[in-house]
Amino acid sequence: MPVSRSLDELGRMRSWFHRFVVAVGVVAAATPAWSAVETRVEVGPLVDRARRAGLRVIESRRLALVTDRPVRDGDGVESLPAIFDQAFDAWCEHYAIDADSLPEWRACGCLVVDRERFRAAGLLPDAIPEFANGFCDRNQFWMLDQSNPDYRRHLLLHEGVHAFTFTVRALAAPPWYTEGIAEYLATHRLDATPDGPRFVPTPVPARAGDVEQLGRIEQLRALRRAAHAPSLADIFALPARDHQAITDYAASWAAVVLLDQHPAHATAFAAAERGPLDAGLTARLRSQPGFDEPRARRDFDALTDGIDYGYDVHREAIEWSPGRPLTAPASTTVVAGRGWQNSGLQLVKGECYMLSAHGRCRLGAIAGTVIETEPDGISLEWYRGRPVGRLLAAQWVESPADGGRPRFVVLAEGAEGRLTADVNGPIYLRVNEPPGELSDDEGSFEVEIAALR
């Protein structure tokens, strides 16, 4: 569902759909508890109706795309059904479903320039509420044409995820999951191949150019700067009528990113997804063995604090143990290629400390030239206002002085510095670099920390 569609309208449609499923009968006992009752729309008659009305129809195994958009070279519309088919296989893989077990599944998507042509053709019923970008009813969806081909494709796949989950998984879940999973499974890039465009799932996009006009990461960072970022509890509690803002979609996507990819939460989330995707999903997630919600809330704040293109949840996963009191000078190692690393050394709020570091790290290569750094970093490139490769020392602060959600507050940086502890808690260290550039890093810094008496 697109970011500006009314969720009041969506809530009414979901409620109607749920009542319909309950009314039509009970699934056989041998069928998994979450399986959908057969309530799919027949696609063939819709295609016949479209052709009689002179509308353009582009078909693949899984999608019949109907549009009144004129043919234009290079707009990518002709390839959309084939890309949809590839995405369908990825959606099946996410839910551990054999795609061959759904041989008859198809969706009908309407790419609309003029709504009245679709109404006249009987393809846009009056019961479908007005929508700003798109709407989905079972395995039929409508979307307004978009000027940007990348966003048009993303919107088609977003609505496609809805069509898939409504009919294959009987989706009637809370808004954070309904919209978060649609954004998560729709996000992708296209790779050019001799056989045509290849769909590559990228739940966290590596580059802004892969997802033009989407802006989820920029929205989260803007919320952080404005001290308006939501908590995970806020996202879990979103009622349908409030899930209209662009930022709600961004935050719901981020919640699914965390839960599906973080090593501490992925097992519990996968177990919850294997059950019914109904209104009780959040409660079942919370009751899963091993699910630590206080930790998940902190991990979510850490994700929104550090999110950027190429963010690797595994590399950025944080060890939150309180550490041991620093009673004498001590040393620790911070490795390149990782996010914030717990030093294991606990500082005392208001006390002053001296930090010194040495060592050398490799930050990959540019045009074949290896880039190396020492703890002061290199001034040829900066990230978030500091030289790339610079050692950063921070504490996790639950109530930052400048407001907003909990976050890491940098207290010292470089090869040598003094710091005053903001809180009673450990000092965290990292090598400053964009999250998407960590995978080819090597090396480490040795860091010594001593209290100043």
Image (cartoon, rainbow, N blue to C red):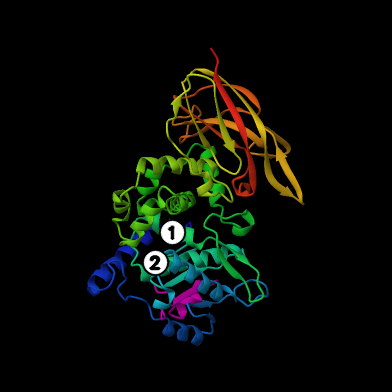
Q: Residue at x 48, y 67 (%)?
A: 90
Residue 218 vertical placement versus 76 (above, below): above
Say which of 269 and 355 sits in front. Answer: 355
Residue 70, image x and y in percent? 61, 77
Crowd around label 1: few <14 · some 14–19 · many ≥20 (10 Å):
many
Residue 305 vertical placement versus 209 (above, below): above
Residue 2 in view, yes or no: no
Disc 2 residue type (three-letter): Thr
Position of the N terminus by quadrant: bottom left
Residue topped by disc 1: 181
Name the mark on residue 165. Answer: 2
Q: Residue at x 50, y 62 (%)?
A: 186
Residue 122, image x and y in percent? 43, 80
Q: Is residue 112 magenta?
A: yes
Instruction: Compute the Cα span from label 1 to label 2.
Output: 9 Å
Residue 219, image x and y in percent? 53, 47
Disc 1 residue type (three-letter): Ile
Say which of 18 and 28 sits in front. Answer: 28
Magenta-highlighted residues: 102-127
Q: Secondary structure at mark 1?
A: helix
Crowd around label 2: few <14 · some 14–19 · many ≥20 (10 Å):
many
Instruction: Check whether the beta carbons of the residues at disc 1 and disc 2 lie within 8 A of each other.
Output: yes
Q: Secondary structure at mark 2?
A: helix
Q: Is residue 304 rendered to the left or right of residue 172? A: right
Q: Is residue 23 rendered to the left or right of residue 446? A: left
